[in-house]
Image (cartoon, rainbow, N blue to C red):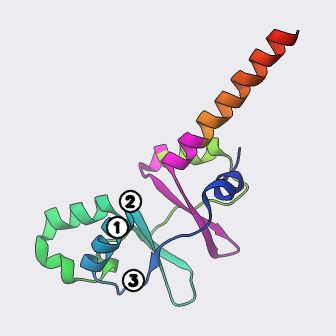
Amino acid sequence: MNVAAILKLKGRDVLTAPPSTKLLDIAQLLGEHKIGCIVIVDGEGSVVGIVSERDIVQELARAGTSVMDEPVEVCMTKSVVSCREADTTDQLMGEMTAHRFRHMPVVERGRLVGLVSIGDVVRMRIAEAEMEAAAMREYIATG
């Protein structure tokens, strides 16, 4: 299974914001859309960062509530690890585990084309295991 298969099932919509967006607005978007992160893009649509609920909580703990009026670029992760549509679910799980994050932007030719979460990967792996188990049962029953 690869990233393209995940995006085909879940869609390619990604909530993005510019680096100048206030942290309070980012937090409101996360809550409103019930999502865990927002990809930060520049004027050309290139990924320049990613901000998660965890990033906001850590910044609040560090600087207090006044930080909510600051631009998201003060606490976003700037060195974003991304993947490509051809990458496998095993590759994604390895990267997410190694770097301890739950969301990975999908980038092709320098452009954001989707976002994959660890939940998406787990759902795909469960579906794959169920299909294999069904095929084995069918093989045993007819063999």
Q: Which residue is mark 1?
A: 30
Q: Hey, what amino acid is under mark 1?
A: Leu
Q: Is residue 100 magenta?
A: yes
- Find residue 128 and report its image quarter: top right
Q: Secondary structure at mark 3?
A: loop
Which segment did they paint magenta? 97-123
Residue 101 horizontal/vertical position (percent): 42, 52
Looking at the image, tell me whether mark 2 or mark 1 is earlier in sequence order: 1
Density class for disc 2 (Cα within 10 Å; few <14, some 14-19, many ≥20) is some
Tell which circle, 3 or 2, labels the residue nearer the N-terminal end: 3
Q: Are marks 1 and 3 in contact (CB under 8 Å)?
A: no
Q: Amino acid at mark 3?
A: Pro
Out of 143 and 117, give the one closest to the viewer.
Answer: 143
Residue occupied by mark 3: 19
For mark 1, give the secondary structure: helix
The residue to which callout 2 is attached is: 36
Real-space Cα separation, disc 1 to disc 3, in angstroms: 15 Å
Q: Residue at x 40, y 64 (%)?
A: 37
User: Of residues 29 and 84, which is closer to you in this image?
Assistant: 29
Q: Residue at x 49, y 66 (%)?
A: 80
